[in-house]
């Protein structure tokens, strides 16, 4: 028996989409209304700032492009003038690619990992409506961001070339249509990937790759030698950009379409613009149809997915370095069971969680980049010590260079340490209750977390120093002294970072970036920045001074170890002693 | 049977969050060999009381003793004889079930051989042998609940505190947990559990405490609770007693209207 069809009225597609989008708007407006006056002022101020930026970017683009388009300038930079003509195509291509790439992660989160999906899919709303609403919610922020950069430039091009009025709505229409098509394609890719791999795992891998990619991009400037960038290379780059302007590409049609509209070439402009709009609509419709077929089945499959059988790790996978594993196990056995258990657990969890791994790999990447830079410098002393300088200056500079490598090793170790010690407690998150209800003392907890952070950081810094030492061929005594400095310096640094990590631990985090409270994180970073140069001054000041005054360097090193060691040990213990009581109350906020 | 040794004892327990009094002057005693059911409406203070008993929250005033040890001053001793299962099992997602149990065993300072033996026993008991080498993030809610209970039992605690232990469990697993709790009580352990399912409390618990707006309003066996409400008949259910004590009878009228 079933109810009569007339008794049940299902909501339509567009009213459902509007309902879902309106909900977001209501939440947004309400959160603004309920925020403090200070926050409201900040938001309004930021809005005005963005508007001012848009206006400024438009004005600069307009004036600059006008100058570049002038016949006087064109003769100096013909390649650039040619490039201006295809600029709309380049911007549309960048928009399409940018939305396509950035939407993947956002859509994965919105379509499969959002907390409201169970609720939404249990309501009689059409799945297509849920999909479109999620798609728009995910794509809109990225679209707005890209528009903020692209529109002033595109409008600037229009104003400088004195295009007709139709150019401007044409640009807006094309941008919106291409963004929707890119988001639709990205969504289809998400739907397909999630049918093969678990959504959560895909998100983890994506986060890992994203973090590594951004680190590589940010550090690539260190490797690239911009000073040697020749005019030929610049021309080659411009030619490379011109290759985006290919006749068969719909993105080129979009660019050429709006330019033709601007140049009053109505037939070509209207035709190309309509063609690209139709293509974008077709792609978006295809993604909607695919969503209808793939989304629910993918979602349902994810929910009911049988657990994949895994072979027991311990039994089946042989370690690469069995000797090292045995040493690790023997070392851990020296500690009490709770401490060794905690260390073993932390190292397992840190290795397996890709979100952590990306943060842990960062220092390795930076270390490799700086090692490459050292190798590139052909092992020459710093340029300050010219061949004409006195032997006294040259000796001091050589000493300084040796000890600078210790500073570099410490920097690499510090990056790892900042993550391991700073987030040591916060990393437990909502699982902290397991530790808190166990009969483990605060001192044992602190010791375990200290060792989890200290041992890998010392090992990494030590290995890094060893590698530089092999490159620089410094003396054995210097190496031993430098290793001792690293061990002591990191000990102090670990104490500071762990103490601030305890003071600012947020155990209710969802996103790993929220693990530590901002104030405590900044204060910890500042303290470390004070501590590191001061300790290095105490460690290296005496040996460098002794060597400079022709006194035995070894005695200077002993003085250095005594002074720097005292500061390091004080920093290793005192901050932890101060926050010791807080460990007992952690998680009670 | 009860041995009349208070394994859990709270004295004038108070917990305030700012101006709000979550738990107000709670005095409870739970003896070895008994299952004590802790009931109350949503927001009555059950979880806050439980968190103070297991040492997750520090009381604003009052004392909690577990096995005769003050949870604040002798935390190590009190915690070493206590096992706890929270309402939401937030566990280390990237550890396997077996690794989690090994880790908990280490935390309680158990010898390694004993840990391994207990792990095999518990995984078999909870039907998790196959899933023992899978990471916990691949477990269903029910499996997570079971591995959390297994973790609480690794060190064979004398006091077991459970917050809504049967939520999300299938009937078979729920029955298993009930049997385990009964066996533990028969072996002399004190079991303190909070639940919303009054049928479980009525059938399983030797004594029941009812908390309402932060205060314990009734404690006793089913018979004692009936007498407290002046109801002599054995046919009156715990639900009737609970609703009459916590002022929920008006909901029954609403339910009648909805019919």
Image (cartoon, coloured by chain):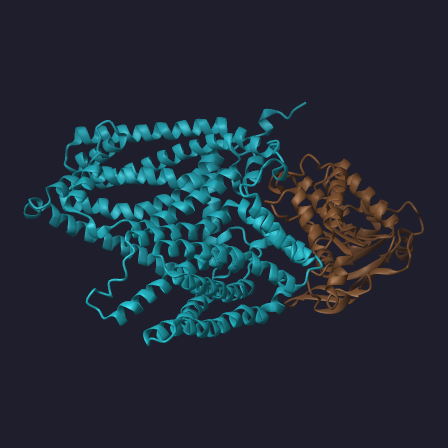
Residue A562 in picture, x, y percent from top left? 48, 74
- In the rendered structure, the answer to whether residue A337 lies left or right of residue A218 reads right
Foreground pick, A510 / A501: A501
- In the rendered structure, the answer to whether residue A329 lies left or right of residue B61 reads left
The answer to whether A465 is drawn above or below residue B150 in the figure is below
Within the image, what quadrant is residue A557 found in?
bottom left
Foreground pick, B61 / A412: A412
Report whether residue A433 is seen: no
The answer to whether A550 is drawn above or below residue A197 in the figure is below
The answer to whether A6 is drawn above or below residue B132 in the figure is above
Q: The chain coloured brown carries which letter? A: B
Foreground pick, B115 / A577: B115
Q: The C terminus of chain A is located in which quarter?
A: bottom right
Q: The N terminus of chain A is located in which quarter?
A: top right
Colour applied to chain A: cyan
- In the rendered structure, the answer to whether residue A318 lies left or right of residue A563 reads right
Residue B219 in picture, x, y percent from top left? 85, 58
The answer to whether B99 is drawn above or below residue A435 in the figure is above
Residue, x 35% and y 43% (percent of image)? A143
Residue B97 in picture, x, y percent from top left? 66, 42
Q: Residue furthest top?
A: A1
């Amino acid at each position: 028996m079933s109810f009569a069809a007339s008794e049940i009225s299902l909501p339509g597609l567009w009213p459902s989409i509007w309902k879902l989008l309106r909900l977001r708007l209501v939440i947004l407006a309400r959160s603004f209304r309920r925020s403090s006056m200070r926050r409201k002022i900040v938001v309004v101020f930021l809005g005005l700032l963005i508007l001012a930026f848009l206006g400024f970017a438009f004005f600069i683009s307009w004036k600059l492009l006008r100058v570049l388009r002038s016949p006087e300038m064109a003769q100096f930079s013909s390649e650039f003038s040619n490039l201006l003509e295809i600029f709309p195509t380049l911007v549309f291509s960048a928009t399409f690619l940018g939305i396509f790439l950035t939407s993947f992660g956002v859509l994965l989160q919105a379509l499969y990992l959002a907390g409201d999906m169970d609720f939404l899919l249990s309501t009689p709303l059409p799945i297509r409506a849920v999909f479109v609403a999620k798609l728009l919610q995910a794509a809109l922020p990225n679209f707005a961001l890209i528009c903020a950069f692209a529109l002033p430039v595109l409008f600037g091009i229009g104003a400088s070339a004195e295009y007709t009025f139709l150019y401007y709505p044409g640009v807006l229409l094309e941008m919106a249509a291409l963004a929707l098509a890119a988001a639709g394609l990205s969504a289809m890719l998400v739907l397909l990937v999630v049918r093969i791999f678990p959504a959560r795992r895909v998100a983890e891998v994506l986060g890992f790759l994203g973090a590594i990619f951004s680190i590589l991009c940010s550090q690539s400037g260190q490797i690239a030698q911009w000073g040697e960038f020749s005019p030929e290379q610049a021309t080659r780059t411009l030619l490379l950009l011109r290759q985006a302007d290919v006749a068969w590409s719909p993105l080129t049609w979009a660019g050429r379409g709006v330019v033709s509209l601007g140049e009053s070439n109505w037939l070509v402009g209207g035709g190309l613009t309509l063609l690209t709009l139709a293509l974008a609509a077709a792609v978006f419709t295809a993604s909607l149809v695919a969503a209808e077929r793939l989304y629910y089945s993918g979602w349902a499959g994810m929910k009911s997915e049988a657990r994949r059988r895994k072979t027991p790790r311990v039994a089946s996978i042989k370690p690469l370095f069995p000797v090292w594993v045995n040493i690790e196990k023997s070392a851990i056995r020296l500690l009490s069971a709770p401490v060794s258990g905690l260390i073993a657990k932390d190292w397992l969890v840190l290795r397996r969680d890709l979100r952590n791994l990306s943060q842990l790999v960062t220092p390795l990447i930076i270390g490799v980049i700086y090692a490459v830079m050292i190798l590139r410098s052909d092992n020459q002393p710093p340029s300050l010590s010219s061949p004409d300088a006195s032997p006294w200056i040259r000796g001091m500079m050589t000493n300084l260079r040796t000890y600078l490598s210790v500073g570099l090793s410490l920097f690499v170790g510090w990056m790892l340490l900042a993550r391991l010690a700073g987030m040591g407690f916060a990393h437990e998150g909502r699982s902290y209750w397991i530790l808190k209800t166990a009969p483990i003392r605060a001192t044992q907890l602190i010791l375990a977390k200290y060792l989890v952070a200290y041992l890998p950081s010392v090992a990494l810094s030590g290995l890094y120093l060893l590698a530089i030492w092999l490159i620089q061929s410094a003396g054995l005594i210097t190496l031993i002294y430098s290793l001792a400095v690293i061990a002591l310096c990191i000990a102090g640094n670990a104490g500071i970072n762990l103490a601030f990590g305890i003071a600012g631990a947020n155990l209710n985090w969802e996103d790993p970036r929220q693990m530590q409270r901002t104030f405590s994180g900044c204060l910890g970073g500042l303290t470390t920045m004070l501590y590191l140069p001061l300790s290095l001054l105490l460690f290296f000041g005496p040996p460098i001074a002794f060597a400079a005054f022709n006194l035995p360097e070894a005695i200077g090193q002993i003085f250095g170890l005594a002074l720097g060691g005292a500061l390091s040990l004080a920093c290793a213990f005192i901050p932890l002693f101060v926050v010791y009581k807080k460990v007992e109350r952690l998680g009670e906020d | 049977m009860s041995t009349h040794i208070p394994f859990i004892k709270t004295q004038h327990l108070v917990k305030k969050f700012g101006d709000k009094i979550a738990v107000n002057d709670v005095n409870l005693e739970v003896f070895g060999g008994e299952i004590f059911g802790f009931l109350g409406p949503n927001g009555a203070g059950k979880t806050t009381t439980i968190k103070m008993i297991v040492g997750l929250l520090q009381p604003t005033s009052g004392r909690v003793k577990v096995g005769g040890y003050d949870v604040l001053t002798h935390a190590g001793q009190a915690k070493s004889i206590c096992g706890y299962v929270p309402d939401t099992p937030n566990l280390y997602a990237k550890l396997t079930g077996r690794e989690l149990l090994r880790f908990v065993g280490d935390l309680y300072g158990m010898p390694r051989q004993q840990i391994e033996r207990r792990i095999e026993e518990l995984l078999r008991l909870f039907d998790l042998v196959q899933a023992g080498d899978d990471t916990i993030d691949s477990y269903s809610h029910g499996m997570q609940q079971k591995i959390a209970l297994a973790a609480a039992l690794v060190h064979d605690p004398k006091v077991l505190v459970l917050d809504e232990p049967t939520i999300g469990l299938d009937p078979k697993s729920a029955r298993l947990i009930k049997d385990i709790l009964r066996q533990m009580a028969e072996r002399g352990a004190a079991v303190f559990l909070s639940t919303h399912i009054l049928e479980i409390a009525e059938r399983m618990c030797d004594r029941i405490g009812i908390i309402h707006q932060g205060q314990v309003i009734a404690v006793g066996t089913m018979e004692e609770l009936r007498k407290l409400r002046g109801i002599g008949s054995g046919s009156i259910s715990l639900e009737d007693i609970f609703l009459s004590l916590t002022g929920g009878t008006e909901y029954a009228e609403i339910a009648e209207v909805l019919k």
